[in-house]
Image (tube, grey):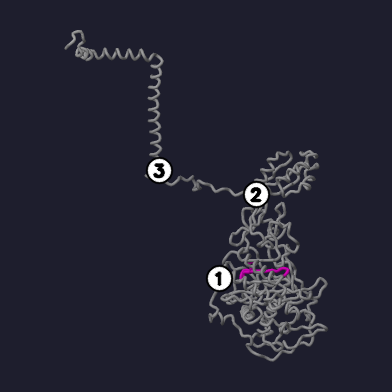
Amino acid sequence: MNDPAAPDPNATIAYQLREPVQAARVADHRTAARLGQPDLARRAVLERSRGRLVMAAAGFGLLYGAVALKATIATVIDPREPRRPAGGVAAAAPRPEPATARAPITDRNGEILAVSLPVTALYANPTQIPPAEAPDVARRLARVLPQLDANRLVPRLMGDRQFSYLARALTPREKQAVNDLGIAGLHFEEGERRYYPQGRAAVHVLGNVDVDGAGLSGMERYHDERLRARPNDPLRTAIDIRVQLALRDGVAKAIEDFSGIGGAGVVLDINTAEVLAMVSLPDYDAGDIGAASQDQRFNRVTVGTYEPGSTFKLLTASAALEYGTANVYSSSFDAAHPIRFGRFTITDYKGKNRVITFPEVLAYSSNLGAAHMAQTFGPQRQREFLGRMGMLSRQGIELTETALPMVPPASGWKEINMLTISYGHGIAVTPLHVVNGIAAVANGGVLRTPTLLAQPPGVPREGTRVLSERTSETMRRLMRLVVTDGSGKGADVPGYFVGGKTGTAQKTGPRGGYLPNKRIAAFVGAFPMNAPRYAIYVMVDEPNPNARSHGYATAGWVAAPAAGTVISRIAPVLGMVPENPQDPAIVQAITIPLQPGRAAPRPTAAAAPAARPA
């Protein structure tokens, strides 16, 4: 049932449809009435901000898109080499080395042996430090620099002078610690200090500099002007640090095994006279010369003069062959009867007590045989020959520390001297004299001045011919015989055909005369004897017998094995490959029999000098 008073719903809908605009206006009017004026303003601001953010985002998007596109093209699509500055100069310049006032010293292969590095020195201006505060300043400095003595610092911090060194070389940390003290009157000075990276190795070759960088000894002193004038040009020496270390180890081991007081060693290029290694023991750390004793600073190779003993028999034999006064195949010498002169007597150590051949004189190291051999050419020609071999003058090596041999004067070189000098007594030379002379004997007969500077490879070095090639060839055979059949057996190294000569000489006392049980044991030789390349000398000063030497301390037990050990280590380092010890061509070239021919003994003088008491 319909209520006539109720409104017609269809009439309402029809009204709303007929009047949509009017209805919307009424709704907006009502909403505006509810929001109010402030809310309308806020909404307008938000609308503007939203538009700006959209624009900014679009801008950044374009920017990053362009960067990404450029990177893709440069690295993936079309990569290019970096552009170089004009003139071909690399864009990344090398880091400059710190400037120094003294050139480095290197070995022949470029290994650094001595170099100057920048350091910071600490000094004080005592006029800026109140005297009453000096003790406190000294104590504060000693706390941060423990190497300084506070009591010794106090006098340096007082007085009227304006400069006083406190420390020569500070580390960056030490410098900062001093700086943090904030003490007026303390200042820093930039300088340089000489460092020796190899420590004790080659210390007697290199020498040292003083606190101001001036050369004190060794090559540092000899080449002082050159090292200062060309600080950026390293001085390249002939030393091979690998050979140097091996030689030092070998000599040190021999000294230790036989309780010696010192020793020496040299390795020499036999054809250029370049010194590849030079060792004198005891030695010291090159960076701490202040702690070195006089004995440690003493260079036994170039300053020490010793009686060479039986190593000189090689020179006696060379002179006899060169003068033609004896023949290796037919000459023989009386070693059965001692040579007496007054109350002295020349004898052989463990002699054969018979007539011996020329090769046996060297193989068995006969003093009697050498003395009789020297008689064949006489005193005058002996002196002339030794002078030609460089045994009467200083060695011209690049060191200021060189000694003059101790020899009889020309007017006093009598038959007495000739006989004792024939087997290495009555004359004193340095180890460098011995090894350089024997190098000339083995290299074909050319004597060259030994050098510590590297020589251009492949360039012949001038020298003086002192022996004929024929004499040199014969002497190489004899030197090899000493190692295979004589006193030098301990020096043999399979495949390297070592040749040489041992020498044991008693030491003389400060008042003359020979000291009992004080001797020099040495070995000098060359290798390989079929084509000699290197000469070697090893010496032990005052060796003592040990259990393994059966009570002996002669060169055959002491120096020869040490030389063999060194050769076995350095030959591969020097690029030498061992050859077949049984190679017929090599064996024939370096072999000579002990008794190539027997002859009647030559007449000898009834009287002769003595080298030592009977």
Q: Which residue is mark 3?
A: 74
> Circle 1: is it few (<14), some (14-19), or many (20+) Cα within 10 Å?
few
| Residue at the farthest bottom position | 600
**What separation in Å lies between label 3 and label 2 (alpha carbons)?**
44 Å
Left or right: where 60 falls relative to 174? left
Looking at the rendered structure, the secondary structure element under dot 2 is strand
Q: Amino acid at mark 1?
A: Met
Q: Quadrant of residue 397?
A: bottom right
Q: Amino acid at mark 3?
A: Ala
> Circle 2: is it few (<14), some (14-19), or many (20+) Cα within 10 Å?
some
- Residue 23 or 376: which is nearer the viewer? 23
Which residue does the image show at 38% across and 19% down from the upper left? 43
Looking at the rendered structure, the secondary structure element under dot 1 is loop
Q: Amino acid at mark 2?
A: Pro
Q: Which residue is mark 1?
A: 576
Q: Quadrant of residue 428?
A: bottom right
Q: Earlier in the sequence, mark 3 or mark 1?
A: 3
Residues in magenta? 260-275
- Residue 275 or 548: which is nearer the viewer? 548
Callouts 3 and 1 close, C-beta under 8 Å: no
Callouts 3 and 2 close, C-beta under 8 Å: no
Name the quadrant of the C terminus. Answer: bottom right
- The answer to whether residue 465 shows anywhere in this view is no
- Residue 115 or 3: which is nearer the viewer? 3
Q: Earlier in the sequence, mark 3 or mark 2?
A: 3
Membership of 495 in magenta stretch: no
Task: Say above or below: 402 vs 307.
Answer: above
Q: Which residue is mark 2?
A: 118
Which residue does the image show at 49% across and 45% down from the upper left? 85
- The answer to whether residue 99 shows anywhere in this view is yes
